[in-house]
Amino acid sequence: MAKPSIILGIDPGLDRTGYGCIEWAGPSRFALREGGVIRTPSSDSLADRIGQIHQQVSDLLDEFRPACVAIEQLYAHYKHPRTAILMGHARGAVLLAAWQHDVRIVHLPATTIKKHLTGNGHAPKRQMQRAVAAAFKLARPPEPPDVADALAIALCAAERLGQGER
């Protein structure tokens, strides 16, 4: 049996950045290590918030020493360009932390992640939460949804890496 890999999934956001750390030993052989949220106060400056995300992700990388960081790709909807810009700031902080720790980065589109877990590339947040709860045999869906999304990102990346996407 191969040595389990640690995968850190990140769902970037300026207000809330979800993270999910899993241990993956092969198809259907995975375990939840930890999931949570990095919150930044909206009253802080943009620079302070980005710095807080970077520092806390760096701390997670030091703690878990993952084989890779999996992160959702940036998606911009024409009706909400500001959301994409803010997400881009958070995403940049995460990518910098991973680069500084020399950790491999896997970028995944949201539709790929959703389809992997639910079979529906446009699954709503509630469905994703239930799918993550079922996959990890949790008593209830992870809250807030950012945690479920981060765990889904980690699981999708692990499965893809296990299929030879090296």
Image: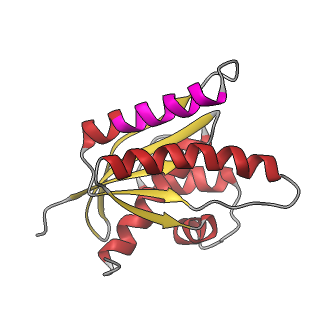
User: How far across and down, in percent of the image, does residue 39 sit?
Assistant: 56, 28
35 to 43, vertically: above or below:
below
Q: x and y percent of residue 137 in the render? A: 41, 50
Q: Position of residue 79 (x, y in %)?
A: 88, 56
Residue 46 appears anywhere in the view: yes
Which is more toward the observer, 166 or 19? 166
| Image: magenta residue range | 46-58
Q: Is residue 142 visible?
A: no
In the rendered view, does 113 fall on the left or right side of 159? right
Query: Can you say which quadrant of the picture contains the C terminus?
Result: bottom left
The kind of secondary structure the magenta stretch mainly shows is: helix
Can residue 50 be found in the magenta stretch? yes
Residue visible at 24% across and 46% down in the picture: 65
Q: Quadrant of residue 120?
A: bottom right
Name which residue lies at 32% across and 67% down.
28
Residue sitting at the far right: 79
Residue 96: within the magenta? no
Which residue is outermost to the top? 43
**Who is closer to the viewer here, 37 or 73?**
73
For the N terminus, the image quarter is bottom left
**Most foreground residue, 86 or 134:** 86
**Viewer-proximal residue among 7 and 115:** 7
Q: Residue at x 35, y 65 (%)?
A: 158
What colouring method underlies this structural image?
secondary structure
x 27%, y 51%: residue: 66
Q: Position of residue 164 (x, y in %)?
A: 31, 81
Q: Quadrant of residue 34?
A: top left
